[in-house]
Image: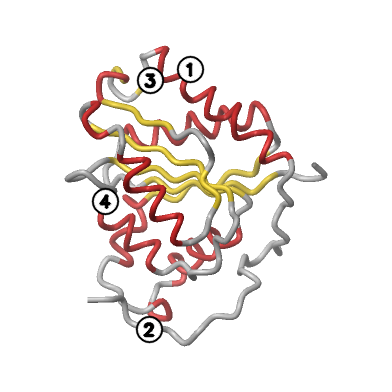
Amino acid sequence: MSRKLKVVAVSGSLQRPSRTLVLVDQLLAALGNEIAIDAHVLSLGEIGPQFAGVLYRNQLPAAVEESIAAIESADLLLVASPVYRGSYTGLFKHLFDFVHHEALTDKPVLLAATGGSDRHALVIDHQLRPLFSFFQARTLPIGVYAVEKDFEGYEIANPALRERIALAVARAVPQLRDASPATTSTTSATPAIRKPAPVALAA
């Protein structure tokens, strides 16, 4: 690969510090050990208050629009959310409501989630995969789910979780090596798609 793969990571946690963000950082570190990446992390704890009440994309603040454009122009998405009432957080979904429905077609997506117990381990396959199937994205074969007992404070303490991270990355990298890095400028990152007129989000 002639240049670094642009990886955009979205952490759906609204809190800092955050176990979800720790998981994101560890996945990025594992990816970076295997393949050259240019990583960008979007934390909903930081940008969420700026778009929580927005209905139209053309009303988004510039910083949030830049975040959406980064998602749309990424070579690889890494998305992670804490489990809330059996699913991803509402603001996580609201963010992706602004993403153009054709922008993620065939884009590789690495899925991750955190929860209080093993009861929600299927959130990756029952909630996150269907969401990105709507976008016709290419979700990578192994997702990573972590529970509170996998951490000591805000550090990963369970060797099994580290092994899961390593396995997810090992299965992902062969597919990523064949990916063509997105062509982006240094000042903006917009998808090469025709955008329709803005519409309100569904009630």
Quadrant for residue 69, please give it.
bottom right
Is label 1 or label 3 in front?
Answer: 1
Q: Nearer the viewer, residue 132 or 47?
A: 132
Callout in the foreground (4, 3): 4
- Residue 135 badge: none
Q: Which residue corresponds to mark 3?
A: 156
Which disc number belongs to residue 199? 2
Which residue occupies 70% across, 62% down?
A: 184
Q: Residue 158 lies in what quarter of the image?
A: top left
What kind of residue is marked 4?
A: Thr
Q: Measured from the top left, where is residue 71 in percent x and y? A: 52, 58
Gap between marks 4 and 3, in whole Å? 22 Å
Q: Are marks 1 and 2 in contact (CB under 8 Å)?
A: no
Q: Which residue is mark 1?
A: 163
Tell me what residue is drawn at x 54 percent, y 80 percent.
195
Horizontal and vertical percent for residue 131?
Answer: 39, 55
Which mark is first along the chain, 2 or 1? Answer: 1
> What sort of colour scheme is used for the picture?
secondary structure
Q: Quick one: quadrant of the C terminus? A: bottom left
| 62, above or below 28, in the image | below
The amino acid pointed to by label 1 is: Glu
| Residue 56 position (above or below residue 152) | below
**Cβ–Cβ below 8 Å for labels 1 and 3?**
no
Image spot of residue 70 (x, y percent): 55, 59
